Image (spheres, rainbow, N blue to C red):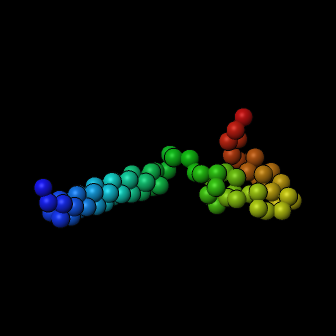
Amino acid sequence: MQYTLISPFLFMCTLLAVCIFALVNKKAIEDRRHDPSVPKSTLAKDGPQGGVAFLQPLEEQERKRAQHDKDVDPVLD
């Protein structure tokens, strides 16, 4: 068997499989992102904890926490 013929074929099959996998997962992520019933990430800026809260000053963290405690259920109990 000549490896010069099978190597490009295997490369193209692998590349095709990776592209199909990426496109399927991209569609799933886009569908999840546009679904309003999916909870926001705790790292999202508009999420329940206001993004990367640990990088903000303590006073600002407490102010945001008090503001969110009024209208958001706790993430962890």
Where's residue 42, x and y in %?
A: 64, 51
Asked if residue 72 shows in the view, the reply is yes
Q: Quadrant of residue 19?
A: bottom left
Q: Residue furthest right?
A: 59
Percent x, y of residue 46: 63, 58
Residue 4 shown left or right of residue 77 in the figure: left
Query: Would residue 31 be found to the left or right of residue 15 on screen?
Result: right
Find residue 28 and report its horizontal and vertical position in percent. 39, 51
Q: Quadrant of residue 29?
A: bottom left
Q: Quadrant of the N terminus?
A: bottom left
Front-most of residues 43 and 17? 17
- In this view of the protein, can residue 63 be seen by the observer? no
| Image label count | 0
Closest to the observer, 49 or 11 = 11
Q: State the residue lying farthest toward the top.
A: 77
Q: Which residue is located at x 73 percent, y 51 percent?
A: 68
Q: Nearer the viewer, residue 76 or 37?
A: 76
Left or right: where 38 falls relative to 16 = right
Name which residue lies at 79% across and 62% down.
Answer: 56
Up the image or down, 16 lies above or below 73; here it is below
Q: Nearer the viewer, residue 23 or 45?
A: 23
Classify residue 50 as left or right of residue 5: right
Q: Residue at x 67, y 42 (%)?
A: 75
Report the residue at 59% width, 51% height from top.
Answer: 41
Quadrant position of the C terminus in the picture: top right
Q: Position of residue 43 (x, y in %)?
A: 64, 55
Name, please, the residue furthest toward the left.
Answer: 1
